[in-house]
């Protein structure tokens, strides 16, 4: 008869022994990998006080986020621990980098060695399903392949006409008597209206109450609520698995799905009707009225996939462009000389106040410099993460001088802070913190400038975003002689999925003496 106590004890010994053996084998493998790749120990390691999960660090990050200082707090750690460093807790570690060479490796040359961070995927799947923002590997490649054709359109004229229609709505909301207003709120409404029209062929009309239905308003609110929940989940970091989704969120997501599904069904029906009529596939959007969803319906008839892609691209396109515009106008209000110089350039290229064409906007270098400078100082996606899909090595960060490769174990999240990289004085000069568009004259920072990401996952809508932003900037400066800041509190960030000003962009405008829109 066996003694049960002894058996249990032996079982525990066996487990501990096998764990110890596994640990030794892993360490030996890591050592061999590091040796083969010339890796050296991390130049710098940031430790946390609560040793298991680093709760103290997490709480401090949440406190800073509440005060509108998370991105700067995170950037300040690079000043303290170096451009590439590790943060160690007993249960997991993270790598941090703002080295252009490391980012190039992670996002381009070593692309296959990394994947999206698990925390991001887990937080976003409930709303975005298997869309382009939540998938890797073949599923992502499929998404990218079906989305790409919609972004390589040659004829931008119908899109510019659509933007002008919504711009007129925005213009109506700008006080002409010098009263202060929040320009940021208007930009977020504008991009919601243009993005929904571009994507689904039906705008939410948030700037145009006369045309807005209750369903459109409800969708805008539901979509926002679901996005905010995804942001909250991402911010929970390692505590995400303990977080409880508020009870109303599943129903809110379902309502947003139902709204988009109507457009999906319409596009699918139209597509098959056209196909039946022509006896062959027809190029959607061949007419003047371009419809993204209809074009997508030509690539796949999977209803759920279509909805996931539309919701994902809505996320990608709406807040990002609004954030860029808001951040740029925040600075323009504080730099009247830049405003005047930009206005002068616009007037030179469009002397009679005519509507901007794509060619005219492309011919304005100062406009592009102003946009670059806003994207540099306030990258719309300031912090991002990838996760090692296998044991790998970053080119820099190891050894006492940080110039040797750094071993990154499979599953380790690598955080990169574009905000901090964009303010590196060795890349942008001693005045890296200043808003000075002229610095872009001849400047080529390569991977040191990364507002749209890089490599195979580079932003698909970059051209669309730059065109939309250029259009709105040009039109605003055609319509207003100058602008004045009306809020003098220091910059505080509102960091959700994108970074904007926590206090809005409170300004007043001086209308132009004559303008085609006045
Ligand atoms: C100023 C405006 C914009 C900025 C700064 C921006 C930035 C970015 C960044 C940083 C990413 C990479 C995210 C990641 O992989 O973690 C991204 C991806 C993406 N963006 Fe944009 N974006 C902007 C506007 C747009 C617009 C207007 C659209 C569509 C109309 C768009 C569509 C996409 C898509 C589809 C992806 C996913 C690409 C992929 O994973 O393969 N973006 N964008």
Image: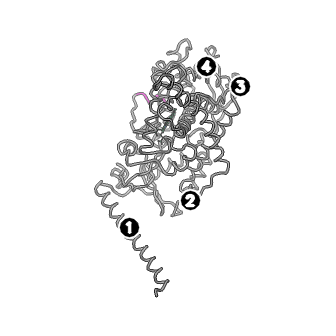
Label 2 neighbour load within 10 Å: few <14, some 14-19, many 20+: few
Query: Alpha carbon of mark 2 to alpha carbon of mark 4: how far?
Result: 50 Å
Question: Relative to residue 248, is residue 343 depicted above or below?
Answer: above
Local SS, label 4: helix
Q: Please name the residue that numbered disc 3 is placed on.
A: 210
Q: Does 112 sit above or below residue 482? A: below
Quadrant of the snapshot with the C terminus:
top right
Q: Residue at x 47, y 40 (%)?
A: 423
Upstream in sequence: badge 1 or badge 2 = 1
Instruction: Specify whether residue 415 is in view.
Output: yes
The residue nearer to you, when weighing 54 against 366, is 54
**Residue sitting at 49 percent across and 40 percent down?**
132
Distance Cα–Cα, label 1 vs label 2: 30 Å
Label 2 close to label 4 by CB (< 8 Å)? no
Graded by Cα atoms within 10 Å as few (under 14), some (14 to 19) or many (20 or more), the crowding at tag 1 reads few
- In the image, 201: left or right of 78? right
Q: Sequence-wise, which precedes: disc 3 or disc 1?
A: 1
Is 430 located above or below residue 121 in the figure?
above
Disc 2 is placed on an element classified as helix
Q: Along the line of sight, which residue is nearer the eye, 213 or 296?
A: 296
Residue placed under numbered mark 2 in the picture: 56
Read off the magenta span: 437-441
Examine the structure image and report whether residue 438 is included in the region drawn in magenta.
Answer: yes
Task: State which quadrant residue 264 falls in.
Answer: top right
SS for tag 1? helix
User: Residue under circle 1?
Assistant: 22
Q: Is the Cβ of the residue at disc 1 closer than 8 Å to that at disc 4?
A: no
């Amino acid at each position: 008869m066996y003694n049960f106590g002894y058996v249990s004890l032996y079982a525990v010994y066996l487990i501990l022994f096998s764990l110890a053996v596994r640990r030794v084998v892993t360490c030996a493998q890591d050592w061999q990998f590091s040796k083969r790749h010339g890796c050296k120990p991390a130049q710098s390691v940031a430790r946390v006080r609560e040793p298991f999960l680093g709760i103290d660090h997490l709480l401090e990050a949440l406190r800073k986020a509440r005060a509108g200082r998370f991105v700067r707090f995170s950037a300040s750690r690079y000043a303290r621990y170096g451009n590439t460093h590790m943060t160690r807790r007993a249960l997991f570690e993270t790598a941090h980098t703002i080295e252009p060479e490391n980012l190039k490796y992670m996002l381009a040359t070593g692309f296959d060695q990394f994947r999206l961070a698990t925390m991001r995927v887990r937080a976003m799947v409930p709303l975005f399903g298997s869309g382009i923002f939540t998938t890797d590997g073949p599923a992502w490649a499929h998404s990218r392949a079906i989305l790409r054709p919609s972004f390589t359109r040659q004829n931008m004229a119908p899109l510019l006409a659509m933007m002008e229609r919504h711009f007129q709505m925005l213009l109506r909301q700008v006080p002409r008597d010098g009263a202060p207003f929040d320009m940021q709120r208007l930009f977020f409404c504008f991009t919601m209206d243009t993005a929904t029209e571009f994507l689904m062929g039906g705008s939410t009309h948030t700037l145009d109450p006369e045309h807005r239905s209750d369903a459109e308003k409800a969708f805008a609110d539901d979509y926002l609520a679901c996005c905010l929940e995804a942001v909250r989940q991402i911010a929970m970091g390692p505590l995400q698995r303990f977080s409880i989704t508020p009870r109303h969120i599943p129903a809110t997501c379902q309502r947003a799905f139902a709204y988009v599904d109507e457009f999906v069904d319409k596009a699918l029906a139209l597509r098959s009707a056209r196909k039946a009529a022509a006896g062959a596939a027809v190029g959607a959007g061949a007419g003047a009225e371009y419809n993204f969803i209809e074009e997508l319906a030509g690539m796949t008839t999977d209803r759920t996939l279509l909805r996931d892609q539309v919701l994902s691209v809505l996320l990608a396109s709406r807040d990002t462009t609004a954030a860029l515009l808001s951040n740029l106008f925040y600075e323009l209000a504080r730099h009247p000389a830049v405003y005047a110089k930009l206005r002068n350039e616009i007037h030179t290229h469009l002397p009679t106040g005519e509507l901007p064409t794509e060619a005219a906007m492309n011919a304005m270098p100062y406009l592009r410099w102003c946009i670059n400078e806003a994207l540099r100082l306030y990258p719309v996606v300031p912090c991002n993460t990838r996760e090692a899909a296998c044991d790998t090595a970053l080119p820099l960060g190891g050894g006492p001088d940080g110039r040797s490769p750094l071993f990154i174990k499979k599953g380790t999240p690598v955080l990169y802070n574009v905000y901090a990289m964009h303010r590196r004085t060795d890349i942008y000069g001693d005045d890296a913190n200043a808003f000075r568009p002229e610095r872009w004259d001849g400047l080529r920072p390569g991977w040191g400038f990364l507002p749209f990401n890089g490599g195979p996952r580079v932003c698909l809508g970059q051209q669309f975003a730059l065109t939309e932003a250029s259009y709105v900037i040009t039109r605003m400066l055609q319509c207003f002689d100058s602008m004045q800041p009306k809020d003098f509190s220091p910059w505080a960030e509102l960091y959700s999925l994108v970074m904007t000003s926590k206090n809005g962009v409170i300004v007043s405008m001086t209308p132009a003496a004559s303008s085609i829109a006045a």
